[in-house]
Amino acid sequence: MKKDNIAKKQQGFFERYFELAKYGTNVKTEILAGITTFITVAYILIIIPLTVSEPFVIMGNEPLANQISNGVFIATCIGAFIGTMLVALYAKLPFAQAPGMGLSAFFAYTVILAMGYTYSQALVIVFLSGALFIIITAIGLREAIIRAIPDSIKAAMTPGIGLFISIIGLKSANIVVDNPATLVSMIDFSQWRNPEFDTSLIMSASLALLCLIIIGVLNAKKVKGAILIGIVVSTIIGIPMGVTHLDTFDLNLAVKFNDFFKVSFMDLDFAGLFASENLANNIFTVFMLVLSFSLVNMFDSLGTLLGAAKQAKMMDEKGEVRNMKQALMSDAISTLTGALVGSPTVTTLVESSAGIAEGGRTGLTALTTAILFLAAIIFAPFVSIIPAAATAPALIYVGVLMLSNIKDVDFDDITNAIPAFITITFMPFTYSIANGIAMGLISFCLLKVFTGKTKEIKPLTAIVSIVFALRYFLITLG
């Protein structure tokens, strides 16, 4: 009886703090949504450490690569926990935050491998971009930028993100594969008879398609937790298919923590970053890198917040995402603190849409995900069992839901239609939300100028477009 009373009090606290009734949800739905989000994004706990450590493998420093991989694993879990917890308690929104794939790849392959900065120096650049985020958010500039985004591009963001997360899912499940002639193509299922072909790829693609059908049927029958059920069932089905591997356990946490404190935690090399014979040139390069991280993170987050919030009808009476400033500040703080623990840029994850599609509407969803990120430090071996073929269909399914918003795009005015089309298509085809928004803004301004409609361009829209154009000419960032 006493335990029941405690449980009721806790449930009552969550209902009051997160205003569950106001947003038409409940504790069970929010927790299921939070679990769904975590399972969908859990792959980053494996991919991010491998991505950041790979430059050192390429450079032939295997011992350092192993240390950094272990350190970044712990840092990713902590950075994701801090960011997602901030969104949960401060912004009270159902979004997860963690190091983003695109920014982590830039951090590793461009800043470290191509430009020659060390891991500790690259973390300083992320730290500075986080500090810049905080300043921009505190003075309200990020909100002003949101309001400066034309309606045609805002309308294009949701379907664009839908296509983007769909291609992430299709690629992750090996349904869409590389093709030297056509860039991409569908996997050749007939190759299952070829002894020289890796048939595990066909099994992965087959399981993903089956999982997508399971999720679709469950949703059609209005089954609660359809995405989560689909992921769990597909993980089990994947065992006899050879897609789910049960031999991926690595329980040596002591080594991981030792490496974390040795190479990642509070190991920012400010002096080394600015030590150069040509100081002025070095400062300019660092400034452009900080600006690049800032711009991409900001527009990735904005696109995700606006796109997913619109899909889930989480906009306020002004047509803006509720608690937007708090969400952006959470993003800014988590980027800065993430760098301190050794994590690449922390950003709002587009995969949060999976939990939102399951009914997540408040910070309780994010709170659940945040706790799971922290628990993943210990339980990561169990999380790693879930194959990409089981989580990828969740992204494809959410992409279907988000693409339906394409009906809101204005295709009657060609000066609005082309920027919208560019926004939608550049997101999946350049693998970047920021590229889609940036190229949409640039094309919008050019079309309006050359058709005599300059009055439709807000001053801040023009400024942001010019900054993005200069960034593309000075430094490439996908």
Image: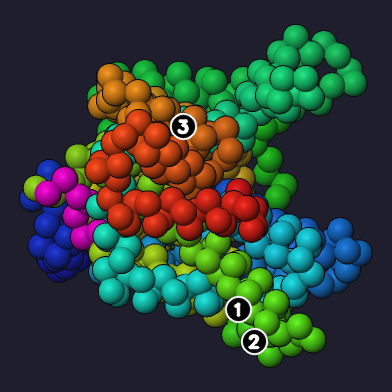
Q: Which residue is mark 2?
A: 270
Residue plotted at (53% across, 51% down):
469
Mark 3 element type = helix
Position of residue 374 measured from the top left corner of the image (x, y, whole percent): 47, 67
- Marks 3 and 2, how far apart in space? 39 Å
Q: For the stretch drawn in magenta, what is the main secondary structure?
A: loop
Q: Is 341 colored magenta in this rendering?
A: no
Residue plotted at (30% across, 55% down):
459
Evaluate whether residue 463 shows in this view.
yes
Q: Amino acid at mark 3?
A: Ile
User: Sequence-wise, which precedes: disc 3 or disc 2?
Assistant: 2
Position of residue 325 measured from the top left corner of the image (x, y, whole percent): 25, 64
* Farthest-out residue, bottom: 271
Q: In this orientation, which residue lies closer to the viewer: 477 or 339?
A: 477
Which stretch appears magenta?
318-324
Position of residue 309 measured from the top left corner of the image (x, y, whole percent): 27, 44
Position of residue 471 measured from the top left corner of the image (x, y, whole percent): 57, 57
Horizontal placement of 68 versus 231: left or right?
right
- Marks 3 and 1, how far apart in space? 34 Å
Marking on residue 124: 1
Q: In this orientation, which residue lies closer to the viewer: 228 or 273?
A: 273
Mark 2 element type = helix
Q: Which residue is mark 3?
A: 422
